[in-house]
Amino acid sequence: MTAKPYCDMSIDELQSELRQLNAQIRRAPAWSAHLSAMDEFRRDCEHWLRRRREETQEKAHG
């Protein structure tokens, strides 16, 4: 995971971050306290990824 905020990341950076988060979540034990935090980071990352894609589509059509 990077120290860069999601709001400042490009689509490629967000996709890379999401892949890393998904891999960490898969490897984490079910009882891990970090699992819920990583899941929250993943949701935030997915949100920003959707937002960036929408912005890109709006620029392409507008």
Image (spheres, grey):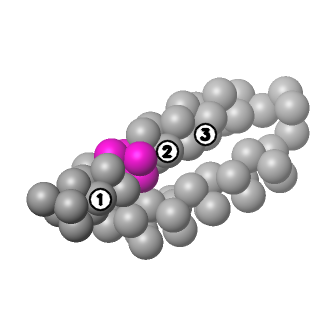
Which residue is the site of mark 2?
A: 46
> What label does residue 25 carry, if any?
none
| Furthest-left residue in this view | 62
Ranked by sequence position, the earlier of labels 3 and 1 is 3
Prevailing secondary structure of the magenta residues: helix
Q: Residues within 10 Å of mark 1 (few under 14, many from 20)?
A: few
Q: Viewer-nearest of labels 3 and 2? A: 2
- Does the CB distance between marks 2 and 1 fall below 8 Å? no
Q: Which residue is located at x 70 percent, y 28 percent?
A: 33
Residue 5 is left or right of residue 46, and the answer is left
Give the residue type at disc 1.
Gln
The magenta segment: 48-52
Name which residue type carries label 2: Glu
x, y (%) of residue 46? 49, 44
The residue labelled by disc 3 is: 38
Image position, residue 12 (x, y; %)? 43, 72
* Residue at screen point 74% across, 46% down: 25
Say left or right for 17 vs 59. Answer: right
Left-right relation of 9 to 43? left
The correct choice, above or below, for 10 with respect to 6 in the image is below
Query: Can residue 52 be seen in the rendering of this structure?
Result: no
Q: Earlier in the sequence, mark 3 or mark 2?
A: 3
Label 1, on which residue?
57
Secondary structure category for the residue under label 1: helix
* Horizontal and vertical percent position of residue 23: 73, 58
6 sits left or right of 1 in the view: left
Pick the quarter of the image with the C terminus.
Answer: bottom left
The residue that appears at 81% across and 49% down in the rendered structure is 26
Query: Residue at point 32% right, 67% down?
Result: 10
Q: Is residue 35 above or below residue 46?
A: above
